[in-house]
Image: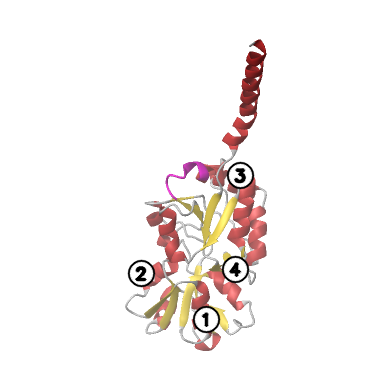
């Protein structure tokens, strides 16, 4: 009987010890972060011929995940369906050149801004639309034209605010389709963040396209937002704080500047937010 008692005590002790060793590790293990992105918005995010996601936001998000010591899984989806999917719980965060705006902040949460670029019109060099010194001058030249823009973006918001009723607006699901129609001459001009035009005009097929002046920046048209950030649900406070901590470190170390110079050819990184990163 005593032998059985000793064996039982030994077994219970071993089980308790195993639980104590496994407990903290199990508690520390967190679920993977599900990241949604466009996959057709170079150089923010795009798909390689091999089916791999690449781009500025993809590289940055991977660095953030490393700093958080979290596993991350990326999924490509057209922009117009991303926010509904985020709200339904399919994703934990969206990345890909997403502008931070007061309207979006009413229902969702952003990380701190980590990059900022203006939006620009682009057109064929032969169209003779370039060289305007200010927006009113370019606007007058665009009246009556057919202009393409990606749906659900800040660029579409600009079109609706500044040109609706004076031009024919064609909406596109993604930047690639927009580019194709611009290259084919089915559009007089197109509007997007400056970065896709940098990518397009740097290719052989895009050599006949030019980025039009002036830059349409966030200071002049404040409804466009204060830059780009990661977009989350408001109930993702823990993930948002961890993501911001990682962004603070990457900004301080110059990593975001390095990545942006690689993908854009110049520094698009924003300063660390003192409210988040401290002085």
User: Residue 119: x and y, percent?
Assistant: 49, 69
Report the coloring of the rendering: secondary structure
Q: Is residue 251 visible?
A: no
Residue topped by disc 4: 47
In depth, the one of 22 and 142 nearer the eye is 22
Q: Which mark is residue 68?
A: 3
Residue 195, quarter of the rendered image: bottom right
Mark 4 and mark 3 lie on one chain; the one further toward the N terminus is: 4
Measure the C-alpha gap from mark 2 to mark 1. Answer: 25 Å
Of pointers 2 and 1, the one earlier in the residue sequence: 2
How many other residues sit within 10 Å of disc 2, few (<14), some (14-19) or many (≥20)? Answer: few
Q: Secondary structure at mark 3?
A: helix
With respect to residue 198, does 73 lie above or below? above
- The percent coordinates of residue 129 (x first, y second) are 49, 83
Which residue does the image show at 35% across and 69% down from the upper left? 161
In front of the other: 1 or 46: 1
- Alpha carbons under labels 4 and 2: distance apart: 32 Å
Q: Residue at x 50, y 77 (%)?
A: 177
Look at mark 1 in the image and give the residue it sits on. Answer: 180
Label 2, on which residue? Answer: 161
**Which class describes the residues within 10 Å of circle 3: few (<14), some (14-19), or many (20+)?**
some
Looking at this rendering, what residue extends furthest in the front direction? Answer: 1
Residue with the most extreme top position = 2
- Are circles 2 and 1 on residues that touch, CB within 8 Å? no
Is tag 4's residue or tag 1's residue first in the polypeptide sequence?
A: 4
Tell me the SS state at disc 1: helix
Residue at 49%, 60% in the rendered image = 98
Residue 73 in which image quadrant: bottom right
Front residue (pair 228, 181):
181
Q: From which residue to which does the magenta span run?
A: 233-239
């Amino acid at each position: 009987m005593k032998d059985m008692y000793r064996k039982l005590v030994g077994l219970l002790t071993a089980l308790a010890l195993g639980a104590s060793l496994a407990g903290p590790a199990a508690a520390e293990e967190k679920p993977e972060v599900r990241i949604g992105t466009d996959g057709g918005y170079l150089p923010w995010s795009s798909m390689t011929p091999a089916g791999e996601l690449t781009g500025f936001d993809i590289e940055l998000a991977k660095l953030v995940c490393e700093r958080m010591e979290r596993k991350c899984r990326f999924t490509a989806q057209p922009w117009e369906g991303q926010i509904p999917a985020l709200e339904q719980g399919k994703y934990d965060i969206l990345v890909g050149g997403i502008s931070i705006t007061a309207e979006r902040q009413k229902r969702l949460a952003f990380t701190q801004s980590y990059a900022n670029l203006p939006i620009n019109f682009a057109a064929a060099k032969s169209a003779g639309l370039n060289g305007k010194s200010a927006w009113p001058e370019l606007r007058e030249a665009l009246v009556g034209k057919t202009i393409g823009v990606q749906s659900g973006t800040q660029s579409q918001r600009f079109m609706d605010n500044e040109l609706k009723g004076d031009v024919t607006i064609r909406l596109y699901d993604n930047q690639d389709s927009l580019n194709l129609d611009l290259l084919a001459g089915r559009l007089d001009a197109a509007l997007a963040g400056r970065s896709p035009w940098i990518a397009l005009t740097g290719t052989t097929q895009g050599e006949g396209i030019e980025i039009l002046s002036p830059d349409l920046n966030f200071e002049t048209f404040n409804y466009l937002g204060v830059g780009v950030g990661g977009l989350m649900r408001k109930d993702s406070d823990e993930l948002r704080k961890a993501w911001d901590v990682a962004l603070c470190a990457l900004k301080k170390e110059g990593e975001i500047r390095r990545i942006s110079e690689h993908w854009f050819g110049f520094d698009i990184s924003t300063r660390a937010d003192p409210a988040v990163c401290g002085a």
